[in-house]
Image (spheres, rainbow, N blue to C red):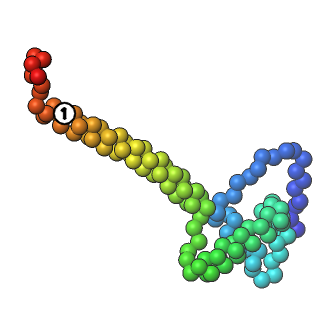
């Protein structure tokens, strides 16, 4: 028989690795195992284990529905951050390009003005 641990102090939120979550979910799916037993074994809430199970099922359903692989949300966040950064850099380069085009146009105009014949210095017209 296993001992029951009573927690009487405030604890910080624990973080579980993906491997730990998968192991708990897989054990809870074994024949004869219950979610409550596995939750007590690992010291987690049964509702948390149900949440992990549902998320795994939903992720699998979405992957099958679109015939694609499931991508981790952390990877999606990183890709979105990278897209924002690239869009920012693109906007900056576009602005620089427009400024350079204006400068080239202005330089061409000045060059044309300097190539015009100069007026005589005296007022003998």
Eyeballing the image, is 125 above or below 100?
Answer: above
Q: Residue furthest bottom?
A: 31
Quadrant of the rendered structure where residue 103 is?
A: top left
Q: Which residue occupies 61% across, 61% down?
A: 73
- Location of the N terminus by quadrant is bottom right
Q: Which residue is mark 1?
A: 113
For this view, does 39 lie left or right of residue 20? right
Disc 1 packing (10 Å; few <14; some 14–19; many ≥20): few
Residue 106 image position (x, y, % from top left): 27, 37
Quadrant of the rendered structure where residue 70 is?
A: bottom right
Quick check: can you spot residue 63? yes
Q: Which residue occupies 64% across, 76% down?
A: 62
State the count of labels: 1
Eyeballing the image, is 76 above or below 119?
Answer: below
Q: Which residue occupies 67% across, 69% down?
A: 22
For this view, does 24 lie left or right of residue 67? right
For this view, does 85 lie left or right of residue 100? right
For this view, does 12 lie left or right of residue 107? right
Quadrant of the rendered structure where residue 27 is?
A: bottom right
Q: Nearer the viewer, residue 16 or 113?
A: 113
- Location of the C terminus by quadrant is top left
Residue 16 image position (x, y, % from top left): 69, 58
Residue 89 image position (x, y, % from top left): 43, 47
Residue 47 image position (x, y, % from top left): 83, 65
């Amino acid at each position: 028989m296993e001992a029951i641990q009573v927690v009487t102090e405030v604890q910080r939120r624990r973080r579980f690795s993906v491997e730990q979550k998968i192991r708990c979910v897989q054990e809870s799916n074994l024949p004869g195992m219950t979610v409550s037993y596995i939750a007590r074994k690992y010291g987690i809430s049964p509702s948390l284990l149900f949440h992990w199970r549902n998320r795994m099922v939903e992720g699998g359903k979405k992957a099958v529905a679109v015939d694609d692989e499931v991508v981790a949300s952390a990877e999606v966040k990183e890709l979105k951050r990278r897209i924002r950064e690239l869009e920012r850099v693109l906007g900056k380069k576009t602005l620089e390009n427009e400024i350079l085009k204006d400068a080239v146009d202005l330089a061409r105009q000045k060059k044309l003005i300097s190539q015009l014949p100069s007026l005589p210095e005296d007022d003998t017209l």
